[in-house]
Amino acid sequence: MEILDSVVIGAGQAGLSTSYHLKRRGLSHVVLDANAAPGGAWQHRWDSLSMHDVHGVAALPDADSPTGEQGRANVVIPAYFGSYEREHDLPVLRPVRVDRVESAGDLLVVRAGNRSWTTRTIVNATGTWSQPHLPYYPGIGSFRGEQLHTRHYPGPEHFRGRRVVVVGGGASAVQLLGEIAPVAADTLWVTRREPVWRTDDFTPDRGREAVALVEDRVRRGLPPTSVVSVTGLALREQEREAERLGAYRRRPMFTRIEPGGVRMPDPPSDDGVLWPADVIVWATGFRPAIAHLAPLRLRSERGGIQLDRGGTTAVADPRVQLVGYGPSASTIGANRAGRAAARGVAAWVSRQAPERL
Ligand code: FAD
């Protein structure tokens, strides 16, 4: 039976960066990816998302950044990842969806359907895209119109002439409103908390502060918030038309959903006012895709996976590294986490199997 030094689960930015660093250190591994093609979650993002919109992505280790400012993110980044995998000859196997990871004495067994891999460590790099978060609201099942999550955003034309409720206080809600408001009959933006607008430019210091906030949460074993969500909101040039139309006049959450729309907590009647709606767009974020790690019982009693000070090693089981999770859930963070995870794997392997290194 072959025993690998590591199995990397997921071939997005975090998984590819990890694989690069594992390879440089001479650590045996495979990268298992559920997608049929390279590109991680980027290949599934909506067509109207350009490289300019995402402010580019961080360069993978030992590579230039992707070119094509105006290109579609869901084309440019998958092509970039694909050529990176080929150029560095990374051992990516796909499509392989990991169902579960089990402990077997000192080793771990990674299972995907009827296939399995035995390994000393794993690096989990599964991102969040497969776990859209849909909060429950009273009456949600009764709505006669259409409901969709950001994950399934079909582009603005779908909303032409319709009355659209957008739920959520993050950057996705702002971007989608910017596209939908100019073509929709009307839009209503609702958020649980007052949105935080950035008045100054986004600086590296602000980025570090945002990461530090999330880092602190995972060190304490709390569920992470999204790094991207704590950086504050800003309107871009292409959102000015929606702003002029009043799309960014934020309203508090509706009290319930009804067949014909959403009930707003407004006077004049105690019962509020019905805002008739054709579509509800849930821009309510994503959660870490980690169900396959459940057999390892990594979650702390505070609901998250506690990571050590290095930011990638699970305190409950140091054979497990998490990258693209919590503080490293950004393209820059994922890159750095790949290096830290490879270091963590090397440290474990040198203790458990010194003959390997
Ligand atoms: P992903 O790119 O999601 O890749 C994960 C891979 O794991 C996928 O290929 C998936 O198929 C695979 N996988 C999942 N489950 C399994 C399984 N069980 N078995 C095998 N494979 C599996 N970051 C920025 O820095 N700037 C931005 O502008 C930005 N915008 C974003 C917008 C949205 C809507 C979202 C959701 C995120 C955004 N991010 C942004 C975050 C950023 O995209 C990621 O944090 C970063 O790219 C790292 O991705 P990743 O490698 O962790 O995951």
Image (tube, rainbow, N blue to C red):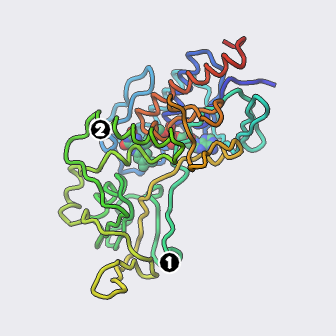
Tell me the amino acid under the disc marked 1: Gly
Residue 43 place in picture, x, y as percent: 48, 44
The residue lying at 31 percent from left, 39 percent from top is 55
Q: Is the residue indicated by label 1 positioned so its CB lies within 8 Å of ligand 1? A: no
Name the secondary structure under disc 2: helix
Which quarter shows the N terminus?
A: top right
State the residue at coordinates (38%, 45%): 228
Residue 269, position as x, y percentages in the image: 31, 88
Q: Is residue 174 left or right of residue 260?
A: left
Q: Secondary structure at mark 1?
A: loop
Residue 68: quadrant of the picture: top left
The residue where tag 2 is placed is: 206
Q: Please, what is the three-letter code of the amino acid marked with disc 2?
A: Arg
Nearer mark to the viewer, of 1 and 2: 2
Give residue 200's quadrant in the image.
top left
310 sits left or right of 299 in the view: left
Towards the viewer: 102 or 132:
102
Q: Which mark is residue 139?
A: 1
